[in-house]
Image (tube, helix red, strand yellow):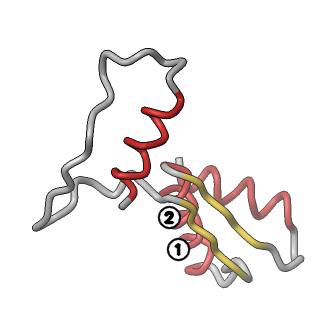
Amino acid sequence: YLAWVAHAVRLAVGEREFHLVGFSFGGAVAAGVSALLASNGRAPTRLSLLSPAGFGPPAGRSIALEKVKGIDPADARVLREATARNLG
């Protein structure tokens, strides 16, 4: 899959400089594609990973997250507060 995406990027950008961005699992994909492109001399000018995921469970640490099950989805205040606590 990464090789296929890297090939598509090369076709789309040609010889121009380009920036590569990935969000969540797309961050893992963007990192892998960037490494493939760099190995062929076509690294992006800039690589931005936004909230990257998909690298496996954290090694040597645990993150206790507050669950928000059983609340009314319309209660935005409770969701905002739980999100704020989970993000630290």
Q: Is residue 58 left or right of residue 27?
A: left
The residue under label 2 is 32
State the residue at coordinates (53%, 29%). 76
In this view, 54 is above or below 20: above
| Residue 43 rendering spot, x and y as whole percentages | 66, 80
Mark 1, other Cα within 10 Å: few <14 / some 14–19 / many ≥20: some
Q: Is residue 4 left or right of residue 84?
A: right
| Residue 45 rendering spot, x and y as whole percentages | 74, 83
| Residue 49 rendering spot, x and y as whole percentages | 56, 66
Say what secondary structure mark 1 lies in. Answer: helix
Quadrant of residue 74 within the rendered picture: top right
State the residue at coordinates (37%, 41%). 82
In this view, 47 is above or below 5: below
* Amino acid at the residue labelled 2: Gly
* Front residue of 44 and 70: 70
* Amino acid at the residue labelled 1: Ala
Contact? badges 2 and 1 (CB < 8 Å) = yes
In this view, 64 is above or below 73: below
The residue under label 1 is 35
In this view, 7 is above or below 72: below
State the residue at coordinates (70%, 79%). 46
* Front residue of 35 and 80: 80
Question: Quick one: quadrant of the C terminus?
Answer: bottom left
- Residue at the outermost left position: 60
State the residue at coordinates (53%, 47%). 1
Quadrant of residue 50 within the rendered picture: bottom right
| Residue 5 rendering spot, x and y as whole percentages | 64, 52
